[in-house]
Each structure stands twice: as C-alpha cells, then as structure tokens.
Amino acid sequence: MLPNHQKQVLLQPIKIHKPSKVELFPSHITLNGQRTSIDSLLTTSSKNESWEAEWLEFIKEWYNSSSVIKVQTSGSTGTPKSIQLKKEFVAASALRTIHFFNLQEGDQVLHCLPSRYIAGKLMLVRALLGKLDLIAIDPASDFSILQNTKFKFAAMVVNQVHKVLQLPRESWHLDYLLIGGSAVPQELEEKLQTINTACYSSYAMTETATHIALRKLNGNTLSSYYYCLEGISVALSEQACLQIHMPGLEHKFLQTTDLAELKDNKSFRILGRADHVIISGGIKFSPEQLEKKLEPFISQPFFISSLPHEILGQQLILMIEGKADSLLEQAIKKTCEQHLSKYEQPKLVRFIDQLPRTANGKLKR
C-alpha cells in the first residue's frame, strides 16, 4: 500500500491550470512550429490514404457544421462499430489532459498516432484548445526526431514505446509519456524505470473520448491503481464490473465489462474482462490474471484461451505466436508448472504463425 503522501500526489494533476475561456474552434493551429490558418487546411486536398490525410480529414470534420464527430471502436471485444461523440464531450476530455499535464500555450507535443482512431483525434483537439505546438510524424516513425527536439508530452501505443527505448537514453528528452491502446507488459514497465520521462498508462475507451483515469508507471509515485481524472468517478456493478460516472454521458453511467477492484470511487485496479472469463471444471479463470503471472517468463507474444472439453466444459490452452517448436513447448510447459497452480495450468500449448490483432494492434481473443 502506498504511503499517504504518495496517494495525494497520484490523485492530483501535476499542476492545475485552467484558462478562463477556451475556444473550441480557433482560427489557427500551430503545426510543426508554424502558425497555420484553419481556412487553409480546410481547402487542402487529401485524396490519398496517408497518415497526413487522416489528420487533415479530422480537422475538416471538427470544423464542419455538425455537433458530433464519428469515431470507430477498435474491435478488440467484437465487431468494430461507428459511434458519435458530441464535440463538447470530446473537448472536455482534451481539457482534462491539458490540465493534468499542465500543458501551456506553445508547448511542443508529439502527434504520432493514427488519426482515424479516437486517441489520434484527441491529440489534434488538445493542440487546438491548448494552443500547443503540434509536431506531427508518421506513426510508423523510428522516433529519431526525439534526438534533436524536446517535447513536453506525447501519447503512444506499446510498440512505439519499444522503438523509443531503442534510442540512447541520453539522446532524447520527453517530459510526459501517455501509453495506451493495450495493457502495458511487465517487461516494458521494468524498462521504464530506467528513464527520466514520467510515464502513465491510460484507462480509456472510444466511448469516453479516450482516458478517464491514469496509472503512474515509474518514479516515486508508481502504482498498480488507476486514478480518475477531474470530475470522474467509478463504481462496481453486481458482477464486479467497472461503471464510469462522468459528465456528458448519454445515460447515468457507462457500464463496462472490465472486472475491477476499487480502492475508493476515484481509484481502481483492472483484473480482466468478464467476457473473457473461462469456466473449466466449475472454476472461473481470468486469462489476463494468468497471463500476468507468465509474462515475465515467456518472451514470445501469447495469450490464454480455451477449447471445448466433454468433462471440464472448457479446457485452458496457451496460444504462442511462432512456428511449432517441441523444445520451446516443453520449456513453456515447465514454466507453467513453476508459476501457475495445478488447476491454472493450460492443458495444451498451441503455436500460431501470427496471433489475431485489430488494425491498431490489440489482440483479438
């Protein structure tokens, strides 16, 4: 359990700074150090499918006459679907991030996420509302730009963070890094302890216009708990799944299928997904919890799944990305025996050339 003084730090933004008035549709945006008129962007053609065309199309959508934007869910828990979010609701999310990280007018922030997804769209909205200097690069970049440009803030997915950590530590400077899109692997968390950048994991979904809570990953105030941003609280359903209470929701609260443990109505831990639970021999297993136990010892991408079984109902299996390898299979089985209880151990280990993923890299179970 964290000391009281650390709890207080975690529950508060880095420094609250609220402008008296925020303009949702400013006439200019600063892109790559240049003050650029929105009118010029609205008349710029974007016929190709490049990453630049994606953010340009979103700028046009933000400034159109509609009160909503259309966004696509990731598809990690089902078929991707299109939903609508009110622009004021999206702006409120952007402002919460600006306030938490104390982003000031003129601060350089790195935009390296695909703008077809909500996380990439929010980087543009933050830049507009906060009058930030948005440095936009290809999401597939090698991030060498960090070696000659200082940034206040960036948001990335896990595979991008791995690229950044391949750069010499002393060659780049970034104050705050927000990591989202999927759970942060334990091995990556350990690497983050060696850098000066303050790193946060986001609890987010498309329906809430990105993150509603943050978890500190390194430094003196690291935690296993997520802490809600300003104006947001959480509760649990009868099934122990997280409920999100926040201004602007269509209904009283947003019900998730994430199994959670609450410290209070502002802080929580995610245990897994209710719709991922496997019942084998009458015992309920959370695959995410089993994976967490194995994560430090298996270097290949993997996940826990199940197959029908006439006696157990379902039997646990472990899916490994890669070519079938009898020696590796035996080593993995031994690892399972050492780190899982008798009933938690997968009955089968199966190899697959490539684990199924969504377009933005999330595993599809």
Image (cartoon, rainbow, N blue to C red):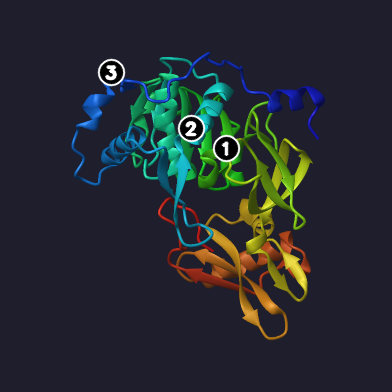
The answer to whether 311 is drawn above or below residue 350 in the figure is: below
Labels 2 and 3: the sequence-earlier one:
3
* Disc 2 packing (10 Å; few <14; some 14–19; many ≥20): few
| Residue on which disc 1 sits | 248
Which quadrant is the C terminus positioned in? bottom right
Q: Quadrant of residue 235?
A: top right
Name the residue beneath numbered marker 2. Answer: 88
3D distance between C-alphas at marks 1 and 2: 8 Å
Task: Kindly identify the amino acid type of the residue bearing the numbered disc 2.
Answer: Glu
Count the marks.
3
Q: Residue at x 53, y 46 (%)?
A: 207
Classify mark 1: residues with Cα within 10 Å, few (<14), some (14-19) or many (20+).
some
Where the N terminus falls, by quadrant?
top right
Location of mark 3 (residue)? 34
Disc nearer the start of the sequence (3/1): 3
The disc at residue 190 is none
Element class at badge 3: strand
Which of the two labelled residues, at mark 1 and mark 2, occupies the earlier sequence position?
2
Q: Is residue 262 above or below residue 3?
A: below
As displayed, is residue 259 above or below residue 223?
below
Residue 21 point in image, percent of width and height? 49, 16
Asked if labels 2 and 1 touch by Cβ distance under 8 angstroms, the answer is: yes
Q: How far across and how far down the image is residue 14, in percent? A: 62, 20
Alpha carbon distance from label 3 to label 1: 34 Å
**Residue type highlighted by circle 1:** Gly
Of marks 2 and 3, the one in the foreground: 2
Front-most of 128 and 120?
A: 128
Q: Is residue 331 visible?
A: no
Q: Are marks 3 and 1 in contact (CB under 8 Å)?
A: no
SS for callout 2: helix
